[in-house]
Amino acid sequence: MGKAKGETSPLGLFVPEPECRPGDHPDFSEMLIPEAGAVRMPPIDVEPMHIHDLAYSVIRVLNDKGEAVGPWAEELGAGELSDDELVEGLRHMMTVRAFDARMLMAQRQGKTSFYMQALGEEAVACAFRRAMRAGDMNFPTYRQQGLLIAGGYSIETMMNQIYSNELDPMKGRQLPVMYSSKKDGYFTISGNLATQFIQAVGWAMASAIKGDDKIAAGWIGEGSTAENDFHSALVFASTYKAPVVLNVVNNQWAISTFQGIARGNAATFASRGLGFGIPSLRVDGNDYLAVYAVAKWAVGRARRNLGPTLIEFVTYRAGAHSTSDDPSGYRPKDESSGWPLGDPIERLKKHVILKKAWSEERHAQAKAQIESEILQAQKLAEEHGTLHNGPHAPAGTMFEDVYKEPPIHLIRQRQEAGI
């Protein structure tokens, strides 16, 4: 029998599926990538309604030949980044990669419990850091170690924190890779994802209320945009025109789900800022020069009191989500090799070689030197202990740095514990 008039079929849910699963051939054919230099650059004081198209395109500077082309390259200007600064940026990314490789090995050797690499994403944090000033504050998630390294933070101190040894500045009270340094503008990482987005907006609002000239940058992965704090941050940032840059690092994969789960039916993550009246841009996250140019533009808006900017960095997580993850269970093993935006280190290397500021020989020498320096820092850090072998911070430190004046119940607990 046919359905009676007015009858409907049972309801169902749509579950997004990635293009490829393990065993499939990687396919990025539906990914729209403009030619380098093809995307326009608006004036810094543009009205958000006039740049909606930038939330759907991808800003690129470096072409396949290694040339810097287009309006965003012109924004950098002659000498904006000298050859020495470009080489320094290249070395920063190489340092992040060498540091990650060494700490991943340390985790496998049982010297720490957990580690997360930024493999393939090094340009995002390293280039962005160059656009900020001393006193500005980053509210990072856990793949922005490049902010510290590009800012000159001590590699040995980072390792001390990863090992939770006696020189750990966190005194063993933070998970590995969750660094913190107020003087370096690096707010304490939170394991509860997305909290840093709304915190960045609040910090920026406080800076404006005080009449200061310091801005904030918030960082989030594409998976965490599904959290409530992401939307709360956009509400407050847009309402009060907070001097903040809100960064979404879209590396295609959360811990086991592809970016389509968090994105839903939205065309891009950047487009989510449009409904809030926030200027929203997408940028090639594997293009050091494009990241720097867009960061400079957004930071400039914030510093001129023109309000927030939302940036989506299009990149790819080449490694596992963490040392507790096996990506072969949910994506093709060779997918990273098919990523159409390439390797950020190789792309900047090609550019500085083209400018005759670098060579393959110098690159090989720098790689060996950086790896040697990382190894030396590791040896120095391990002289002060590792997670499983100690020594660690005294147990009594768990009561410190929380309250200015410890409450009586904690004083009593410490006395009862004898620490």
Image (tube, grey):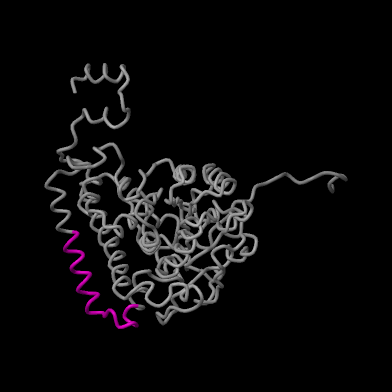
Q: Position of residue 66 (x, y in %)?
A: 40, 79
Which residue is more in the foreground, 150 or 178?
A: 150
* Residue 410, horizontal then vertical, whole percent: 29, 20
Judge from the rendering whether residue 371 lies leftward or rightward of residue 256; answer left or right: left
Q: With respect to residue 401, does 153 lie above or below?
A: below
Point out the stretch of residues depicted in magenta.
352-374
Snapshot quadrant of residue 354: bottom left
Q: Can you name the residue that lies furthest to the right here?
A: 5
Residue closest to the far left: 383
Q: Is residue 338 visible?
A: no
**Residue 326 place in picture, x, y as percent:** 37, 53
Q: In which quarter of the image is residue 351?
A: bottom left
Q: Where is residue 250 in the image (x, y as percent from the top left)?
A: 48, 58
Picture residue at 23% right of the left edge, 31% below the top: 397
Main secondary structure type of the part rendered in magenta? helix
Residue 10 falls in which quadrant of the image? top right
Position of 368 with respect to 280 (left or right) is: left
Query: Can you say whether 277 is above or below 282 in the image?
Result: above
Quadrant, the C terminus: top left
Q: Does the magenta stretch include residue 50?
A: no
Using the image, determine if residue 98 lies above or below residue 400: below
Do we see residue 239 in this rendering?
Answer: yes
Give me the residue at 59% from left, 64% from top: 56
Q: How many marks?
A: 0
| Identity of the residue drawn at 64% across and 64% down | 50
Residue drawn where x is 56% and y is 44% of the image: 236
